[in-house]
Image: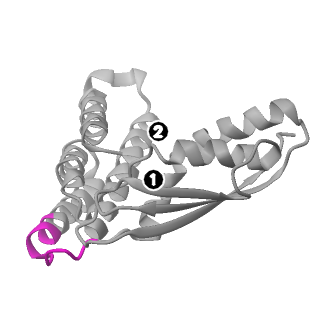
Amino acid sequence: MRVGALAQAASGLAASMAALPACGERCTAEDKAELVAGAVGISNMFYNVFATSLDEAYYAPTKAIYLTIAQHGDAARKAEAEKFTAQLDQFKTNSKPKTGKHDAAVVAPLLAMREQVVVACYEQGLAGTPTLAGQVKLALEVAADGRITGASTTPAAGAQGLAAVGGCVEAAARTWTLPARTMPGVTRLSIAYDLSPKQ
């Protein structure tokens, strides 16, 4: 997720939450709580990315979402958002240069957001082999700027079965972009997808 998409996510959440008062009785308390909870989940994910990678692209959108939560959430949400906003600023001010890294646990939710691509590749395989099932493991090499510089799968890319699914996933993965990190070097990540036909 890069700068344009991050800013769009932040502005979209801000607009949705700003519209809550005008929604009145059409929006139930559960609707409002669900929207705020969703904003909290996204802001916390962005916060974790910035805190570990120090990718500046995540700083402003994260802060914008927290400020929106503080404005429109209840007292508990406001206090939590203000606390994380202060911590976010501390990370920005106090972090040492070239210490940001790609934390596998933090990057995992971002990779999970790409899962629909894997499903699409698998569905192509199912069209030719309706009983196709198994695991495809994706290995990635990520440059410091977030570009995918290497991708491979197990089973290796091929023409049929899970190998064909792997080839499709590998080709798609090479177009992805992950957060940048301030520490020079290459990050190696892997994720496994267990695939089976829907019952």
Res. 110 mark? 1
The residue lying at 36 percent from left, 44 percent from top is 36
The residue lying at 24 percent from left, 57 percent from top is 81
Does 12 sit left or right of 140 as displayed?
left
The residue lying at 18 percent from left, 60 percent from top is 85
Q: Nearer the viewer, residue 42 or 149?
A: 149
What SS does tag 1 mark? helix
Q: Nearer the viewer, mark 1 or mark 2?
A: 1
Q: Nearer the viewer, residue 142 or 50?
A: 142
Give the residue type that dot 2 points to.
Glu
Q: Position of residue 27 (x, y in %)?
A: 41, 27
User: Disc 2 marks which residue?
Assistant: 30
Alpha-carbon distance for marks 1 and 2? 27 Å
What SS does tag 2 mark? helix
Q: Nearer the viewer, residue 72 or 101?
A: 101
Q: Which residues are magenta?
A: 89-100
Q: Is residue 113 above or below residue 20?
A: below
Q: Is residue 114 above or below residue 190?
A: above
Does 91 sit left or right of 180 as displayed?
left
